[in-house]
Structure formats: structure tokens, C-alpha cells
Image: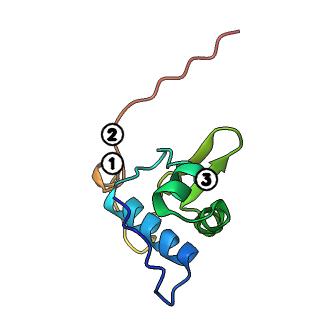
Amino acid sequence: MIEQPDSNSAKPLYKQLEAALKEAIARGEYKPGQQIPTENELSARWQVSRVTVRKALDALTRENLLTRVSGKGTFVSSEKFQRSMTGIMSFSELCQSPGTSPGVTHHQICF
């Protein structure tokens, strides 16, 4: 759970909220693709203005940690597929590497 802000801290409230949300995402409290609480909910929970919440969410959106969908809400961005080009991996190793999930997708196009 996101901890309460420290109004006596030299760190601005929006930076505290930004750090707390980053930590919550890193801990898996909010998973990729999951909607985070609304600006109003975060504002009430943190007892700060929506402007402060929006500033924190804007910063996390610029870092590609969050994605905003107009009329729907703010979501944790999907994990990016990143691989090192320094080593050679077999197809089996690639399929079993962290951040991947095995499976088969079937697409059918009908006219």
C-alpha cells in the first residue's frame, strides 16, 4: 500500500507520490496493464490536490511507466520486450527466459 506523504519533507509532494507509485509498481502491487486508482482516489488517499497527483502521473507517463487512455483511466504500461544482443540464445532458451510466457496464438482471417 502507498504510504502517506511527509509534508515536512524537503521533497515536493508530487515527487513523493511519484516515488511511492514507482515502488508500488516495482513491488507488483500494480501489474502491467492494470488500472491504477483515479486522480480523485489518489488525491483523497494522499490528501493532496488533483494538480499534485496529475503532476506525479505526468512524470510517470513521460517515463513510460504509465499509459493514459482518454475516458478509461491510467494503466501500468506493459513490460517491454528487451533482449541483449551480446549473447546467442537458442529458441528454447528464449522462450523460457524471464518476462516471457509460452503459448500459441491462432489467428484466422475470414472474408
Identify the residue shown where x is 45% and y is 28%.
105
Task: Using a 10 Å C-alpha cutoff, classify the residue at mark 1 as few (fewer than 14 neighbours), some (14 to 19) or many (20 or more).
Answer: some
Figure colour scheme: rainbow
- Disc number lying in front (3 or 2): 3
Image point (58%, 50%), residue name: 40
Mark 3 and mark 1 lie on one chain; the one further toward the N terminus is 3
At mark 3, the secondary structure is strand
Residue 95's mark?
Answer: 1
* Image quarter of the C terminus: top right
Front in this rendered view, residue 51 or 87:
51
Residue, far top: 111
In the rendered image, residue 69, in percent from the top left (x then y), is placed at 66, 44
Tally of numbered tags: 3
Q: Nearer the viewer, residue 85 or 54?
A: 54
Are the two marked residues, 3 and 2, in contact with CB atoms closer than 8 angstroms?
no
- Residue in the picture at 54% in, 22% down: 107
Query: Which is more foreground, mark 3 or mark 1?
Result: 3
Please give the name of the residue rendered at 51% of the width and 90% of the height, measured from the top-left corner.
Answer: 10
Q: Amino acid at mark 3?
A: Thr
Mark 1 and mark 2 residues within 8 Å of each other at the beta carbon: yes
Marked residue nearer the N-terminal end (3 or 2): 3
Q: Position of residue 28 (x, y in %)?
A: 34, 56
Residue 76 shown left or right of residue 88 in the figure? right
**Marks 3/2: CA distance?**
25 Å
Report whether 65 appears left or right of 49.
left
Label 1 or label 2, whichever comes before in sequence order? 1
In the image, 100 versus 8, the foreground residue is 8
Q: CA distance from mark 1 to mark 2?
A: 6 Å
The residue to which callout 2 is attached is: 102
Residue beneath disc 3: 67
Could you tell me which quadrant the N terminus lies in? bottom left
Residue type (three-letter) at the residue carrying disc 2: Pro
